[in-house]
Image: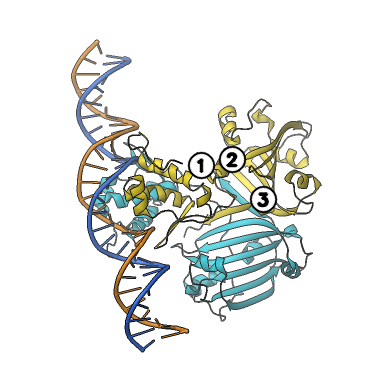
Chain colours: A yellow, B cyan, C blue, D orange
Amino acid sequence: MNLTIDHQSTIPLHIQVENLLRELIKQPEYQAGKLLPNEMELSRILAISRTTLRQAINKLVYEELLVRKKRLGTKVAHQKMSSKSMNWLSFTQEMEARGVTIKNYELHVSWVFPDEQVANFFDIKPDKKVMKLERLRGNPQEPFVYFVSYFHPRIGLTSDDDFKRPLYEMLEQEHYVVATLSKEEISARTADRFIANKLEIEVDSPILFRKRFVFDQAERPIEYNLGYYKAESFVYTVESKRTP
Amino acid sequence: MNLTIDHQSTIPLHIQVENLLRELIKQPEYQAGKLLPNEMELSRILAISRTTLRQAINKLVYEELLVRKKRLGTKVAHQKMSSKSMNWLSFTQEMEARGVTIKNYELHVSWVFPDEQVANFFDIKPDKKVMKLERLRGNPQEPFVYFVSYFHPRIGLTSDDDFKRPLYEMLEQEHYVVATLSKEEISARTADRFIANKLEIEVDSPILFRKRFVFDQAERPIEYNLGYYKAESFVYTVESKRTP
DNA sequence: TATGTACTTATGTATGTACAAAAACCAAAT
DNA sequence: ATTTGGTTTTTGTACATACATAAGTACATA
């Protein structure tokens, strides 16, 4: 990997440094809470000022990719695969940002008659077909989540749509639908035969089950989503603040 | 409101400025995308350097409370979403609100040496004892959650404290500790013998496991909480909104 | 009227410098 | 053996300064 920086580039230095650090901490030697070189040395190595270096580091600290510790140094935060509730990045983008490459194991589109819950959520008659999207996704080693999504017919999705793109980006750009509100319910379950088979785990293994209801600006229903997460490999994180 | 800053205070200037800005943009005159005074002027008014002011502004920009615009200035972002996942009600109050009466099956206070994770979270040495609070709670028919909480020694909790009261209310009124920020991690697990016994379920039944980290206004650690929820009786809900 | 150009004003980028504070470390004193 | 206190290392805070860049504004010009 190239540990230098182009001072002539039009890209701001601190951005270059930020990207460099992002790459750096993806390397195997920095995975396990290892310390970065200290700021003085690192700024010397990169031939930039400590101030500029700190500007880049600060951003990654804010994203919780790095953790500072006085006298000790700055170390790589322990990375978990997690989903931040308020983060409106797509699943893939979210994971890539954390250094996890997402692989699609299966991707299947079909039109089905909605069951009672789905029909009820979309407020449509059960004889009106809806689009069903099934996706088995994970890291390059193994699948760790099985998604089932249903979309409201109003949106006008077709099989020609590119479901390999970030979903909400595609909806926004191709169908002018902006996902604005989501309600989620998270619970624990055991895997039935179908899910166990998909996720390559034993029947009755624990899974994290997430129902997600997505709405647009006008609070009209867009998506009804079920997610089955392999328990060991997934943690759902929530951050909340109280204002006095 | 007081628009000045205490240069003699031990609180870092940029934190003071940050807090001041947070207050400022809550005022009615700054609600509707109004512009802040420009950086030069604001730094002059507050008698701080522009660098320090920018340090504070940057943080709020990162939190999407402020938006910078070249040549225009920095304006208040359109109202932020609030993730109301943790209700900031106490568990009991929360449940009572849903019409469930809470029964305490067990309540046990002890002083223990923290394990590595707890010591690390509180940032204390592992030979400093912390208070451990174990609670088995549920509805009148059956227990459905087992909580283990550790509290930072700084708070000064004793066995004499009344743990039957709503916890955060007690902390606030008796120990002047205000829980302001919480980070939670939710995952699925199976019950080991200990937990299965407590929750009166089979070993290896699925449980919802929640780690909760609670901080005060200054983001100092207060409580390290583990919750083991009987799967059938608990669903975690999250609502989040995006603003365009 | 439309268009280009210089000016102005705000944020953006980058550096150098200085001292403070926390914590690990180590040695001396008890 | 344990406490105490100083030393060192690393991040934390703060300032002054300089120039770059984007985007309005105003004015001259075709």
Q: Is residue A34 left or right of residue B76?
A: right
Foreground mark, 3 or 2, reads 2
Q: Residue at x 69, y 27 (%)?
A: A159
A226, above or below C26, in the image: above
Residue A191 horizontal/vertical position (percent) = 76, 50
A171, above or below B184, in the image: above
Foreground mark, 3 or 1, reads 3
Q: Secondary structure at mark 2?
A: helix
Q: What is the number of callouts on the image?
A: 3
Name the residue type under label 2: Thr
Image quadrant holding the N terminus of chain B, namely bottom left
Q: Residue at x 50, y 70 (%)?
A: B172
Residue B60 horizontal/vertical position (percent) = 41, 49
Q: Nearer the viewer, residue D16 or A36?
A: A36
Res A92 label: 2
Res B243 label: 1
Res A185 label: 3
Name the residue type under label 1: Thr
